[in-house]
């Protein structure tokens, strides 16, 4: 399964990990030099969440940004059989 948020469509992005050598000019050095670049992935923080879709409860894969923003409605907690009797 691909790493895609089912609400906002957020997905894995590609970037570089940059390796540097030297001391910054403001710290008295000659400046920072880039000595290497490696490809890396930035994956969204996806979580499986039970969410209400109309009247049904479904499991969705949602990024934590959508979860914190409250873009889904969670189902009400179910009563246990022991507590009911």
Image (cartoon, rainbow, N blue to C red):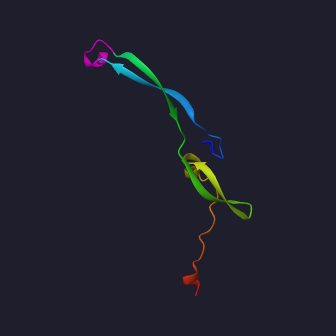
Q: Is residue 56 above or below residue 15?
A: below
Q: State which quadrant residue 30 falls in.
A: top left
As drawn, is 37 to the left or to the right of 4? left
Question: Residue at the left extreme?
Answer: 28
Magenta region includes residue 57: no
Residues 40 and 67: in front is: 40
The residue stretch that appears in magenta = 23-31
- Which residue sits at x=58%, y=81%? 81
Residues 69 and 46: in front is: 46
- Which residue sits at x=57%, y=78%? 80
As drawn, is 21 to the left or to the right of 18? left
Q: Main secondary structure of the magenta part?
A: loop
x, y percent for residue 68: 55, 51
Q: Quadrant of the N terminus?
A: top right
- Which residue sits at x=60%, y=53%? 70
Q: Is residue 15 above or below residue 28?
A: below
- Which residue sits at x=66%, y=47%? 6
Q: State which quadrant residue 58 falls in.
A: bottom right
Residues 72 and 41: in front is: 41
The number of numbered badges drawn on the structure is 0
Magenta region includes residue 30: yes
Question: Residue at the top extreme?
Answer: 30
Question: Residue at the front extreme?
Answer: 1
Q: Quadrant of the C terminus?
A: bottom right
Question: Residue at the right extreme?
Answer: 54
Q: Is residue 5 above or below residue 13?
A: below
x, y percent for residue 21: 32, 18
């Amino acid at each position: 399964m691909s790493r895609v948020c089912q609400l906002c469509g957020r997905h894995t992005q590609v970037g570089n990990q940059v390796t540097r050598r030297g001391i910054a000019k403001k710290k008295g050095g000659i400046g920072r030099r880039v000595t290497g670049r490696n490809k890396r992935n930035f994956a969204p923080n996806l979580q499986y969440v039970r969410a209400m879709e109309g009247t049904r409860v479904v499991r969705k894969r949602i990024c934590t940004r959508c979860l914190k923003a409250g873009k889904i409605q969670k189902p009400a907690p179910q009563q246990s059989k022991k507590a009911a009797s």
